Image: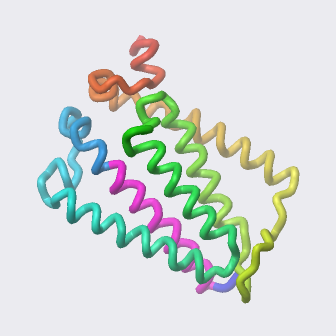
Amino acid sequence: ETGICLFFKILAVTSLWEFTHIINDIFDEKIDKILGKKTLITSSLISKKTYFKVAILFLTISILPSLILKRIIFPLLVIFTILLNFIYSVPPLRLKRSGLKSCFIGLGSIIVFLFGYFWPSTHFTLQIYPPLTHEIILLLILLFFSASVGTVISDLKDFKGDKKHGIKTIFTVFGLE
């Protein structure tokens, strides 16, 4: 893999992460204010409209490199991430309230891994290469569970805001004890 392809992968993943982060900030404004969390919106440093435009810019920046890599898997991973982000952060679904936050983080970790795992192509192709072997699938399962379980502790710091807004986490369902 050449350095330029690695650059495009990193650009796509980091831009995609920024996009999802901004969308989450936009729809978490009320909760973040209660928690005293400093974001660009809660600090009144940027309007929602402008912040949304920045999100679209990052989204565009994430899509273009995925197309340059010339394998269908890269734009599909970007689209899948966008869908996950909207299912997680945006009403009416907003599954963030369901207690599945850690699962979304696990899925995001798998996506980042797959961006690194698959190779770019010199011409556009539908072929997925290298193939997903049994060992890689087991590694993805391990990655999913370790990233999902490992992030549960982050729910502790958001306990007050999550409880007030009816977001289900281990701590809001079972208590702090």
57 relative to 111 in the view: left or right: left
Q: Provide residue 8's location: percent of width, then percent of height.
A: 55, 79
Give the residue at x 63% y 39%: 146
Q: Provide residue 140's location: percent of width, then percent of height.
A: 72, 48
Quarter of the rendering containing residue 68: bottom right
Q: Residue extending furthest front?
A: 92
Quarter of the rendering containing residue 112: bottom right
Q: Residue extending furthest bottom?
A: 122
Give the residue at x 49% y 36%: 101
Of the pair 135 and 80, the residue shown nearer to us: 80
Of the pair 128 and 145, the residue shown nearer to us: 128
Q: Residue extending furthest left?
A: 44
Magenta segment, prevailing SS (helix, strand or loop): helix
| Quadrant containing the C terminus in the rendered view | top left
Q: Provide residue 57's location: percent of width, then percent of height.
A: 36, 72
> In the displayed structure, would residue 174 be above or below residue 153?
above
Instruction: Count the labels in the image.
Output: 0
Give the residue at x 80% y 54%: 136
Give the residue at x 76% y 48%: 139
Question: Coloured how?
Answer: rainbow
Q: Residue extending furthest right?
A: 134
Q: Does the magenta stretch include residue 11?
A: yes
Q: Does the magenta stretch include residue 124?
A: no
| Quadrant containing the N terminus in the rendered view | bottom right
Q: Provide the residue span drawn in magenta.
A: 3-24
> In the displayed structure, would residue 1 be above or below residue 89?
below
Q: Provide residue 138's location: percent of width, then percent of height.
A: 80, 45
157 relative to 42 in the view: left or right: right
